[in-house]
Amino acid sequence: MMREEVYRTVKNIQHEEHMAPGNPLCAGCGGLLAVRLFHKALGSNVVWVNAAGCMTMLSLYPYSPIPPFPHSPIPPFPHSPIQSSWLYTAFASAPAGAQGVRDALDVLIRKGRISGKEDLKVVVVTGDGAAFGIGLRSTLGAIQRNLDFYYLRYGNEAYGNSVFQMLSSTPFGSSSATTEPTPLFPEGNSGRKRDLFEIWKAQKPSCLATESAFRTVDFLQKVEKSTHINGPNCSYHRLAAPRAVGTTRRKQFASRSLE
C-alpha cells in the first residue's frame, strides 16, 4: 500500500524493496534506478504499463527458474523482478493501455468488486523512443483527457532496442547507429534535440517535474508530492548512466550548436 513519506535525508528512505535483485538490463542503468525509487515512493499497489523499449527486458527475468523449464537460464516470457503488476504494450500505446487499466479499476471500485484500499497507481514507463517519437501523440491524448496516471520517461536519447538509432531526443553532434560521422556529416547527428518538457508543459498536465536518480532525496520528494495530485503526473527523468550514443564529437561542434 502507498504510504505518505517525508523524505528529508537518505535516512528517511524506507528499506522495503519492490524489485528483486538481478535483471538483464545494462549495468548501471539510471532508468532502472528511477523505476526502483519511483516504486519506493508509490508503495506496493502499483501497475506498470511499459511501452516497448529497453526497459521491456525486465519481463525476461533470468534468476527464477519456472517449471517446466527449471534449468533454463532465461524463463519464458513474461516474468519480471518487479513485485507488483506489469503490463507490456506496443510502442505507441502505453498511455492508451494506462487508460484501459485506470477505467477498469474505476469500474471495479464503483461496482464494489474491489475496495478503495485495493486501488492501484497506474504508471507508464518509457524510454525516449516512445516518449519523443512513436508514442508522443498517445501521451498528449492522455494528458488532454486528464487521465489519472503517472508517466516516467527515462532519457536514453535513442531507440534503445534497435542498436540505439537516432531520434528527436538524440543531441546534436552524437554518433548513433544511424548518424555515424561521415565526410559529408562529420558532426554525426546534425539535428537538434526536441524540447519534450515544453511540449508537455503546453498541454498543462496536473503535475510536471524533472528528476534525476542521482539526486535521490529530491527525486523521492517530487514523486511523493505528486501522489497528492490527481490527473496526469509527468516525470522527465534525466538519465544518470553511461550513454549509448557517442559524445566524442560534441565539444568540437558545440559552437555550431549554439549559433
Image (cartoon, rainbow, N blue to C red):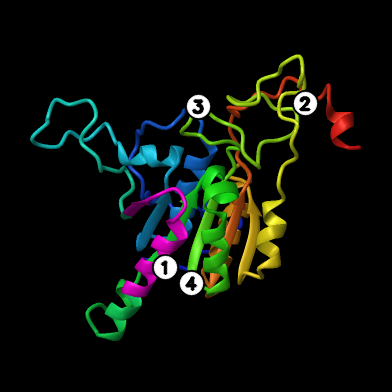
Task: Confirm whether the magenta stretch covers residue 102.
Answer: yes
Q: Which residue is mark 2?
A: 250
Q: Which residue is mark 1?
A: 99
Q: Give me the disc on residue 148.
A: 4
SS for callout 1 = helix
SS for callout 3 = loop
Q: For the residues carrying marks 2 and 3, which lies nearer the camera in this image?
A: 3
Residue at left offset 60%, top offset 29%: 243
SS for callout 2 = loop
Residue at left offset 43%, top offset 41%: 55
Extent of the magenta region: 86-104
Work out which residue is located at the far left of the displayed protein and give it: 68
Q: For the residues carrying marks 1 and 4, which lies nearer the camera in this image?
A: 1
Q: Which residue is mark 3?
A: 163
Q: Is residue 247 visible?
A: yes
Quadrant of residue 121 in the image?
bottom left
Callout 4: few (<14), some (14-19), or many (20+) C-alpha neighbours within 10 Å?
many
